[in-house]
Amino acid sequence: MNAGRYIVENLNRPLIYTLLIICVGAITYATINFGYIAGLGIAFAPVFVLYLMYIVDKPIWGFVTMFVINYYISGASRYVKVISPGIFMDLILLVTLVSLVFQFFKSNSKYKWRGSYNSLILIAFVWLFYCFLQLLNPEGLIVAWFTAVRSIGLYFFLLVLISSILLKEFKDLKMIIFIWGILAITAVIKAFIQKVYGFDAAEMYWLYVEGGARTHIIYSGNRYFSFFTDAANFGSGIAFSGVVFAITAIYIKPLWQKIFYVLAFVACMYGMVISGTRGSVAVPFVGFALLAFLSKDLRVMALTTFMILVVFVFLRYTNYGNGNSYIRRMRSVFNTEDASFRVRIENQRRLRVFMKERPFGAGIGMSRKQAKSYNPNEYLMDKPNDSWYVLVWVETGIVGLILHITILLSILGYGIYIVLFKLRNREVRGVTTALLCGIAGLYVASYSIEIMGQFPTAFILYIAMTAVFLSPSYDRESNLIQGAGEKENEQTYHYYELET
């Protein structure tokens, strides 16, 4: 049914004019008394309602909306202070889940809950269940748990569940990766603008009032962060993107898409460099090393191995380019005597003493910056985690860390197995390899950066993990389509033979 036509045919003009006057009055009143954000909220409320109706019918577009907003939400919160990235994304997730609940009752919907199960849903649920058991941890606080459990466990489960239902077709995954490429390019453009034209007023406020300058305006030069929470998140996240795009460019079929992904890769590598994030260097090194192992192609294997060795020798054994502050920072990754590295090791040594008597950790949410307001153990207050794995260790204990690493390695191991022995379609195998290599690189980078629980990288990572587990169904789908096409061509050939 056409909503606009229905309204026009069933409402008389005086009533429409009256409603318009009421709306204008409400917008004006809200803007004058509560600010322009409230006015804009009321003005766009009808559009929002119509869009909700649309995504209830087509939930894949709710998923796309969530994917795009996830990419920009951290940056937007610098300009619109009333936006809380966590709460806003919770609402988007809720809307997407509600739209999927409606699909459950539609007999003709292609987004069926039945048949969407895969083992990653169970794996994510096991981790979420352990996080719920942390409510019993006497070291923790319930308010801290509710604040932090989303990023450490809940988002993982929900994204895996939603992606398993909505990304059943390979074309949907390719659409998401293409959108990801566009988003990544805009992020690099934003970082380039920061570098060339300087930071805007909102970014300056974040740097010099909220304390971001301490880690971003440093002796070796400025570090740029784009729309992301900080430069570390930007550098590692954009390197993750670059690895995926580079490998996708090798295996994707249309030429224009190959060109697009090559350009996106180059842009992402530039973004990684100007972020000044040393830990992000691990992402392409590990990602391309895994590609050499998985490619089953001597040319790809030789080229990636050669590139890795050249870059490694350049950074580790030469001094060329030391006049550039970004090259100096990347080179310090291989320096075990680096002051920053030594501080991290010393912090972990001290934490080891504290954690010896806490096998289940200090409680979820009790080791982060905002935890100071909860009066956590004084021993933790002056010791930054500086690592996703240290954060998991401190908050969930050695038991939680072992479980978490086992989960991550099982995901990687399963992905390697299916790429090597199960997937037959070249394009599906290539895209799965791209995602898997990016995931492996991010695993290693997370040793020095708290990245797995941050927007936008966390959402993208969980979707990529899900796609790896869905790849056998993509493979079957692509082989069926390819087989049907070959059969049709064969029938056409026989038809022309008979005609001649």
Image (cartoon, rainbow, N blue to C red):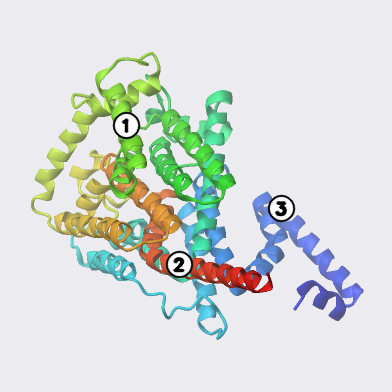
Where 336 sits versus 94, above or below? above
In three-dimensional space, the C-alpha distance between marks 2 and 3, rounded to whole angstroms, equals 56 Å
| Disc 1 + disc 3, Cβ < 8 Å | no
Where 112 sits versus 33, above or below? below
Q: Which residue extends farthest front?
A: 500
Q: On the image, numbered disc 1 is attached to which residue?
A: 306
Where 182 sits versus 202, above or below? below
Which element is circle 1 on?
helix
Q: On the image, numbered disc 3 is attached to which residue?
A: 31
- Quadrant of residue 396 in the image? bottom left
Residue for point 45% across, 78% down: 113
Which sits in the foreground, 125 or 154? 125
Q: Position of residue 174 (x, y in %)?
A: 51, 57
- Within 10 Å of disc 3 (Cα), the crowding (few <14, some 14-19, many 20+) is some
Q: Quadrant of the C terminus?
A: bottom right
Q: On the image, numbered disc 2 is attached to which residue?
A: 479
- Quadrant of residue 48 in the image? bottom right
Q: Amino acid at mark 3?
A: Thr
Circle 1 or circle 3, nearest the eye: 1
Q: Position of residue 387 (x, y in %)?
A: 27, 43
Which of the two labelled residues, at mark 1 and mark 2, occupies the earlier sequence position? 1
Q: Amino acid at mark 1?
A: Phe
Q: Position of residue 495 (x, y in %)?
A: 64, 73
- Within 10 Å of disc 2 (Cα), the crowding (few <14, some 14-19, many 20+) is some
Which of the two labelled residues, at mark 1 and mark 3, occupies the earlier sequence position? 3
Is residue 229 at all visible to an observer of this figure? no
Q: Position of residue 496 (x, y in %)?
A: 65, 69
